[in-house]
Amino acid sequence: EIAADTIPSAFPQTESERVAASTRRLMLAFLITGFCALLVGATIGPLQALNYGGVDAYPALRPLLQSYYQGLTIHGVMNGYVFTFFVTCGLLVYLPARELGVTPNLTMWRACFAIMAVGALCVLYAMGDNSSSVLWTFYPPLKGSPFFYIGITLLALGSTMPLSILLQMRATWRRHRPGEITPLVTYMSLTTMLMWGLAGVGVVAELVLQLDPWSLGLISTVDPIINRTLFWLTGHPIVYFWLMPAYVSWYGLLSRQVGGKLVSDPMARITFALLMIFSLPVGTHHQFSDPGFSSIWRGILVVLTMSVATPSLVTAFTIGLSLEYAGRLRGGQGWFGWFRALPWSDPSVAGQILAAITFILGGATGIVNGSWQLNAIVHNTTFIPGHFHVTVGSVTAMTFMAITFWMVPHLTGRQLISRRLALFSVWVWFVGMTIFAIGMTWAGLYGVPRRAWVSALPHGTYHALYGAASVPLALVAIGGVLLWVASYSFFAVFFGTLLFGRRAAPPPIPFAQSFGGPASSTIDSPPNPARSASPLIRALDHIWLLTGVTALATIAAYIPILWPFLHHVTRAPGWILW
Ligand code: HEM
Ligand code: CU
């Protein structure tokens, strides 16, 4: 059972009130910073959509943006790294802290915020002065300024710091409750952060050993293929670092928000354990078109990649069934009645369910990308950004937006200024992103290249090259304009609530109860011995074993690929193409 939160007081009285108030303020700081990044990214995104529709807005933006590629770098970095990292590093500390009833190490959490903030400012500076239009993948030999690489290094390092905070909190909790099973939200957060801590090794090695010293002039050449391989060692798992926090909300909170229960606690745990193990070894599936490693390995990678689709399918079924359970409790009948009976008028619920629906298109297109032969057809076309805007661009972005609809009131004691505008924003995002993604994937099948300033071509050339794809490209532009409407409606609600929301009792965190798992247990609730849990749940609670298995599988998958690269080093000088 959850105690109702008290109204946050402007003048906390006791020590524990003071700590609780600092924890809330820090969570709010992560949230606001993350969404400020999205505000920048979502302002630029539609310009890119218009570009594909043949509308070149960039000459008019000259003093602000020198080129399409400068804007695209800012879009990818602000949305893909800054927005997601800040929100996740807030949520995955705050939710477990409240679930366990333990205070997080606030010094460490502040340091995490500060390091990422300095990193974000460095990267913003480097992108702003047009020195680093290297896109969010910063593939060498494209060469940006040291501020860019050092900023990314700080962002990456800072984003792994919640791992140690979580481990500390779990240790404190265990001292009070020896021999018990880790509560679900903490378990999901911990496996996410362990996965990310391991994954980070790739990009941190790339930056610290190669790109940082290179940009500082300490070394004069770098090896592009080794760096791409290190990048994707982190770059594939990052897609799970984007998705898993959204799954934490779907499994851990949504079933409560819709008035039911999570139908299977063990399924949630299996999903997170499998995501952790399978995420890391498959990073080189982003390199199907790169030379230099054997076709046997490419085949094995396809199989491994399809296995990482399994936990996401399990999620679809478990979340689907939890929603059905709640819908039937609410009186919904027949095949689809339960779906209509869900509380659609709650913008937080609507946002998350709509996010989950877009994931059907995201998962299906992901399977195309992950299949070697089909990948050759879609490689470097608009199909790829079409795919990941219905994963990170909607599953993550919409779930995070939906979370703010209860969390901002929860943290600030202010009511949403308009539930209707909140609902409108997520519906328009859903419709806009779906139209956009259909347009992008469809245009990709005509071979329209991604990362191309096609609108700057002479009019006749644009039509000669892409006229056949004019219908899908029009959809891209229409989707983009709808997304402007959606994001500004959302930001009106978000900032409006922070500034002008009426004072009201803050809602509690909607932690879900579940079937088949240990009862929820803060440090001061009645004991709940592990032997009551199933053997499976007990086995999955050995997080260090999972970590070891993941590390071994990763090393086994990477040695045969990296080995030949390390024996045929190429030395490329930097390129500055902008
Ligand atoms: C790339 C539009 C939101 C992450 C793109 C591209 C377009 C676009 C058209 C492809 C550009 C190209 O390949 O030349 C939009 C629109 C958005 C939006 C209209 C609505 C607000 C988001 C969100 C995220 C995101 C929410 C992530 C949280 C990215 C990334 C890239 C990208 C990582 C790749 C950049 C690159 O290729 O270097 N976006 N986007 N976008 N977008 Fe978005
Ligand atoms: Cu991948």
Image (cartoon, grey):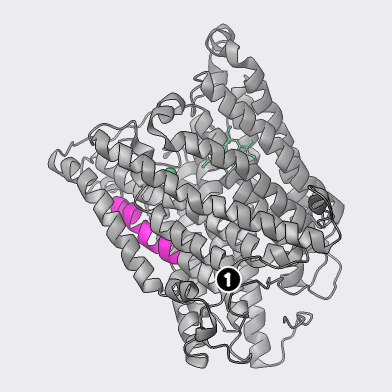
Q: Is residue 166 rendered to the left or right of residue 400?
A: left
Q: Quadrant of ligand 1?
A: top right
Residue identifier under label 1: 185
The residue drawn where x is 55% and y is 10% is 458
State the residue in front, 30 or 164.
164
With respect to residue 541, does 366 lie above or below? above
Number of numbered discs overlaid on the protein picture = 1
Q: Quadrant of the N terminus?
A: bottom right
The residue drawn where x is 54% and y is 48% is 78
Q: Is residue 524 rendered to the left or right of residue 380?
A: right
The answer to whether any part of residue 458 appears in the image is yes
How far across and down, in percent of the image, does residue 187 sit?
Answer: 51, 71
With respect to residue 120, does 288 lie above or below? above
- How crowded pointer 1 is (Cα within 10 Å; few <14, some 14-19, many 20+) is rated as many
State the residue in front, 173 or 536.
536
How far across and down, in percent of the image, does residue 450 sit?
Answer: 49, 28
Looking at the rendering, which quadrant does residue 363 occupy?
A: top right
The residue drawn where x is 33% and y is 58% is 201
Q: Is residue 144 rendered to the left or right of residue 507?
A: left
The answer to whether any part of residue 154 appears in the image is no
Q: Quadrant of the C terminus?
A: top left
Instruction: Name the residue furthest left.
Output: 567
How far across and down, in percent of the image, does residue 174 sit?
Answer: 48, 87
For mark 1, give the secondary structure. Answer: helix
How far across and down, in percent of the image, does residue 6 sit?
Answer: 77, 82
The residue drawn where x is 13% and y is 42% is 567
Three-letter code, disc 1: Val
Report the span colored magenta.
Answer: 193-209
State the residue in front, 291 or 147.
291
Whether residue 181 is in magenta: the answer is: no
Whether residue 195 is in magenta: the answer is: yes
